[in-house]
Amino acid sequence: MLPFTREQFFAVFLEYNNAVWPASIVAYGLGILALVAVLRPKPVWSRVAAAILAVMWAWTGVAYQGIFFSAINGAAILFAALFVAQALALAYFGFTKNHLAFGEVHWPRAIIGWVFIAYAGVAYPLIGLSTGHSYQELPQFGTTPCPVTLFTFGMLLLAKPPWILFVIPVVWSLIGGSAALLLSVPQDWLLLASGVITITLLISSKPKPGHSAANER
């Protein structure tokens, strides 16, 4: 049993989105800037993308999870800590160490990466609107957990980051994606599957032992 109702769940989004407006518009601008990093695969742009992802996770962890969602769910404090931890990991590995390298992955990993990005920014809110909710009642791009997670999966699949950057997003895909089942949030069905899809892609794209040597013969 969840400690809140479906009505309370959407009421928190309404209160939060109204309070932080126009943060979602700023988030779309940052998202577009992050995509420039994918199209211009240079170290400086990789750092920009990592910084943007870190800001999205930190903001969502503190503002949404820590301040608003915690009002109806005590576990949100733990969720806030997870999101801040992911922000720090992105800042360290992606910005400080510059371990994001865009433009070096191929299909199907690249295709799925773009699908996740398009879904987070375009399809996710459209599906939500189709259920009869107003835009302000819905999880919004760049400032709420589920779209942020899907966008992050997409960006990471288009790069070659350390595996540790996938851990918390995979965990949240299961926690946040459960809303598809428990709260009848249809746009979260892909989130629920995204962690499994991502892990499968990572395993399948991992070089097999002896593969490089065999190619050199």
Image (cartoon, grey):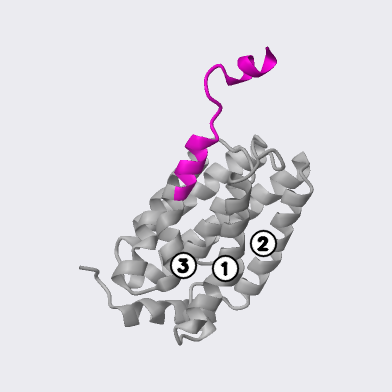
Question: Would you name the residue on which mark 3 appears?
Answer: 64
Residue picked out by circle 2: 31
Point out which mark residue 141 bears: 1
Q: Answer with mark 2 or mark 3, whichever residue precedes in sequence.
A: 2
SS type, badge 1: loop
Mark 2–mark 1 CB contact (< 8 Å): yes
Q: Nearer the viewer, residue 15 or 195?
A: 195
What's the residue type where badge 1 is placed?
Answer: Phe
Q: Residue at x 45, y 60 (%)?
A: 191
Q: Amino acid at mark 2?
A: Gly
Q: Secondary structure at mark 2?
A: helix
Task: Answer above or below: position of 158 versus 80.
Answer: above
At 32% from the left and 73% from the top, the residue drawn is: 183
Disc 2 versus disc 1: distance between alpha carbons? 9 Å
Does the stretch in magenta take in 167? no
Which part of the image, by quadrant, shows the C terminus?
Answer: top right
Q: Position of residue 111 (x, y in %)?
A: 62, 51
